[in-house]
Image: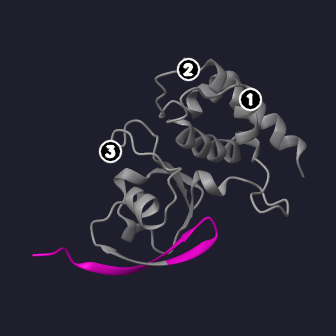
Amino acid sequence: MSEELVDIRLTVNDVVHALRVPARRLLSDALRHDLGLTGTHVGCEHGVCGACTVLVDGRPMRSCLMFAVSAVDTEITTVEGLAEDDGSPEGRLGPVQQAFVECHGLQCGFCTPGFLTTITAGLKHNPEPTEDEAREMIAGNLCRCTGYANIVRSVLRAAEIASERP
């Protein structure tokens, strides 16, 4: 017996996509396999590591814990959607992305998309975090490479960059 397929519409990075997916398709799988947005990484598949974090209506959500059908009528932002529109085809790096480059906030890069989306949402809530608040902001995301010092610096630098941009 095959799994029931459902027709859904997902708004991802400001683009509406019509999909026909199994009812129990995870949002992470819909993003990666159905839409080809492979920037959303899947690490633990239990919502623990944060690598699959995307923004759903501006709030960080673990896409490996959410069914795609649950994301209908929401605005989803993946790491691919964090670049700012500057008229070029690829856009310019968003403040958090730019800060990660400047502060060497990544090593292997596997956890980076989850950190970028999490921090983007965190800075909207708290645009001028202290170092302790920056650590709290990223506490739900795991990195096995960096030791977090450069990621914390990236959060603080991203806040500076964001405040400098109109």
User: Mark 3 to mark 2: distance in Å?
Assistant: 22 Å
The answer to which quarter of the image holds residue 48 is top left
| Magenta residue span | 1-17
Q: Residue 35: give x, y in percent of width and height.
A: 48, 66
Q: Is residue 50 above or below residue 151?
A: below
Q: Secondary structure at mark 1?
A: helix
Q: Which residue is mark 1?
A: 156
User: Mark 3 to mark 1: distance in Å?
Assistant: 29 Å
Q: Residue at x 79, y 60 (%)?
A: 85
Q: Which residue is mark 2?
A: 146
What amino acid is labelled 3 in the image?
Glu
Q: Residue 149: give x, y in percent of width and height.
A: 63, 18
| Residue in front for this viewpoint, 108 or 120 | 108
Q: Which residue is mark 3?
A: 45
Q: Is residue 33 left or right of residue 161?
A: left
What amino acid is labelled 1 in the image?
Leu
Q: Earlier in the sequence, mark 3 or mark 1?
A: 3
